[in-house]
Amino acid sequence: MNYRHLYHAGGFADVVKHAVLALILGRLAEKQAAYCVLDTHAGIGRYDLSQIAAQKTGEYLNGIARLLTAERAPDAVRPYLEAVRGLNPGGQLRWYPGSPAIAAALSRRQDRLVLVELHDDDVAELRRTLGRDRRVGIHHADGYAALKSLLPPKERRGVVLIDPPFEAGNEFETLAASLIAAHARWPGGIYVAWYPIKDPAPVRSFHAALKSSGMRKVMIVELLVRRADSAGTLNGCGLVLVNPPWQIEKALDELLPWIADRLKQGPGPRGAWHWLVPE
Ligand code: SAM
């Protein structure tokens, strides 16, 4: 496990993932009943962008930094931006919230966060950052195994984020199989699974596997920061949403083009969604 998320924290891939996660948490909070967030690949919780790793790639400069300086963000993006601003009360961007810190900022007293991380150092850091929060449970474990052991949650409502590092050659296959099996275990959950867009072929096979699985209400959200024809580089990323909240389409129509326009790195940027399998 060589992957260190600090190099990528706050980059365009984090932005779209966290903005959509924030949107979903906002919708879940419209009902009083408690919800559960299961984050299978949680990372360290929050990231110090002043550290050498983040400065070396500067990915956040082409990501969150561009959004914070933009005027008039659409309503759909605001909860996410507020979570980032909340970590940087002085106004200077230094700390970037990972998915656990986004969830902690936007969830309520009655909600529960279950965070799973396999890397020894990362789970220790995660414990230091969020371990004292009474709503939080931290597991030093394999995130895919956690989908089997921890679902369904007792709340029977909530969201599962599956955000693997894509270091392994077969990660697309593992992700598809794990998502399908998790859905069979808990068909009513909301699922958000992240994937990279480098070459189009593995993405097509991934979508085909999900389409033929029998799952319904499967939505694809994609952000391209340049046309997807520069093979081998990260041209964009996608999210598979299963059971997204009702009428999320309208919010995504606001959020995605705005983000794509701000985060473009070449010709052909695009932020869009479509139903892979409708209801
Ligand atoms: N979800 C985080 C966020 O949005 O802030 C970022 C997660 S990062 C993309 C992937 C994380 O998964 C890394 O921290 C890595 O150490 C961890 N990881 C790698 N393999 C894992 C596994 N099998 N189970 C759980 N965590 C794993």
Image: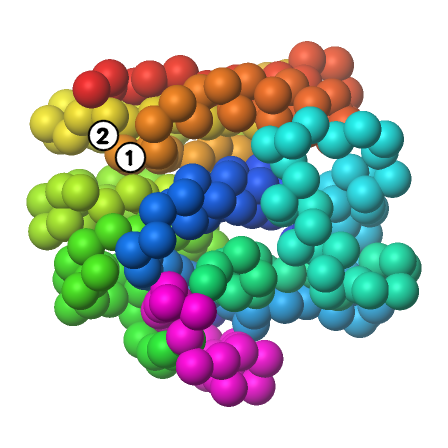
Tell me residue 62's x, y (percent): 79, 40
The one of 36 and 64 positioned closer to us in this rendering: 36
The one of 46 and 155 positioned closer to us in this rendering: 155
Q: Which residues are magenta?
A: 109-135
Say what secondary structure mark 2 lies in: helix
The one of 45 and 120 positioned closer to us in this rendering: 45
Tell me residue 170's x, y (percent): 32, 47
Q: Where, by quadrant of the figure, is residue 134 drawn? A: bottom left
- Total labels: the figure holds 2
Q: Which residue is mark 2?
A: 210
| Residue at the spot 69% in from the left edge and 23% down from the top edge | 258
| Residue at the spot 49% in from the left edge and 80% down from the top edge | 133
Say what secondary structure mark 1 lies in: strand
Amino acid on which disc 1 is placed: Val
In the rendered structure, does residue 233 fall within the stretch colored magenta? Answer: no
The image shows residue 181, relative to residue 50, as above or below, that is: above
Q: Which residue is mark 1?
A: 242
| Residue at the spot 81% in from the left edge and 43% down from the top edge | 68
